Amino acid sequence: MEVGMIRKALSGFYYVHTDDGRVLECRAKGVFRKEGVTPLVGDRVEVENGVVSRILPRKNQILRPPAANIDRAVLVVSSDKPQPNTLILDKLIAICESKGIEPLLVFTKTDLADSSDLQEVYRRAGFRVFTSCPGQTDYSGLLAEMAGRLSVFIGNSGVGKSTLMNALIPDLEVATAQISDKLGRGRHTTRHVELYELEGGGLVADTPGFSTVEIEKYGHIPKEELPECFREFREYLGQCQFQNCSHRKEKGCAVLAALEQGAISPSRHESYCALYEDAMQIRDWERKEGDKRS
């Protein structure tokens, strides 16, 4: 028996990099299909006779890309074309928080528009924020955050994920999306999901760009868990007048008091309220089904 990590999954084959430095082309044990379990890129697995026989416990997983045991999510946000959508960004951040994944924000195309005010909103909320523009060569800060960790790139179509990955991994041949002026979003051309090595020893996976509708594939967060997924709320939780405070309009709400005092960004609180309303509409069976997929 050998132990290693799945670095690539393609057409039913799993390419496992073992702890002793070998690469094994494997099939998955048939029982996985019966149990509704699929080995994922990033999984630590046991291999016997060319077959993935056991998947070691996962700390998390996401659907796009199908990957497990993620440490960092690089959320790529375009400063222009397409315009930043803070609700989508805040939902992605909340999902990362719920799964124990640290979000790293990269604002691209800073040569086309000034996004410094929006960047500051997220810095004040406690996130690490980076920028990217054509011709940039210094990504040392971002690379340091990804070193020795498994990261995924996530972002709307056309925001420049492939361009950024090519800058971080010069030898990587990833087709760059062509921007559609009519639609305001790009056409995704990345062909498959695979873990690529960074110079700092980290691993990174690209993910197909998504539309607004497809954001639902990343999962749902129950309304009871949502406040903890907004990190700037956390120090105020438990200080409200009412124990079941939803932090939207109640009297004696410590979160709303912080909002009025400027400690919480209005746009972040607006996103929270919108996500809370969405969570109230989700039926239990829909949430459970989404949890299975994500």
Image (cartoon, grey):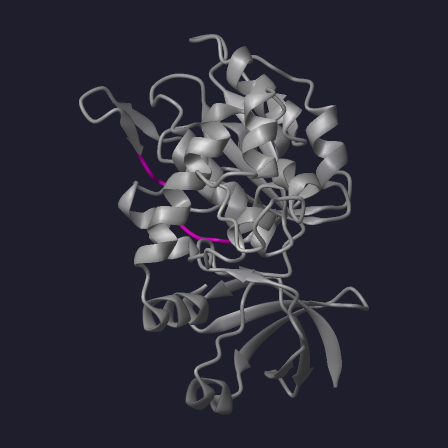
- Point out the image quarter for the N terminus: bottom right
Residue 69 is drawn in which quadrant?
Answer: bottom right
Q: Is residue 286 placed above or below 233 in the rendered structure?
A: below
Q: Residue furthest left?
A: 182
Residue 14 location, quadrant = bottom right
- Percent across and percent down for residue 123 are 64, 24
In this rendering, the count of numbered labels is 0
Q: Residue at x 53, y 42 (%)?
A: 93
Pinpoint residue 182: horizontal percent, then vertical percent: 18, 22
Q: Residue at 27% of width from left, 46% of height from top?
A: 213
Q: Is residue 246 magenta?
A: no
Q: On screen, 270 above or below 45?
A: above
Q: Nearer the viewer, residue 189 or 236?
A: 236
Residue 271 seen in the figure:
yes
Q: Residue at x 42, y 57 (%)?
A: 220
Residue situated in front as seen by the camera: 274 or 84? 274
Q: Position of residue 89 (x, y in %)?
A: 46, 35
Q: Is residue 236 above or below residue 3?
A: above
Return the residue nearer the eye: 273 or 29.
273
Q: Taking 48 as reference, is 221 left or right?
A: left
Left or right of residue 67, residue 175 in this image:
left
Residue 208 seen by the camera = no
Viewer-closest of 90 and 146? 90
Where's residue 176, x and y in %? 40, 31
- Is the stretch drawn in magenta largely helix, strand or loop? loop
Residue ID at (56%, 39%): 253
Asked whether, in this view, residue 231 is left or right of residue 9, the answer is right
Q: Is residue 32 left or right of residue 123?
A: left
Task: Give the extent of the magenta segment.
Answer: 187-193
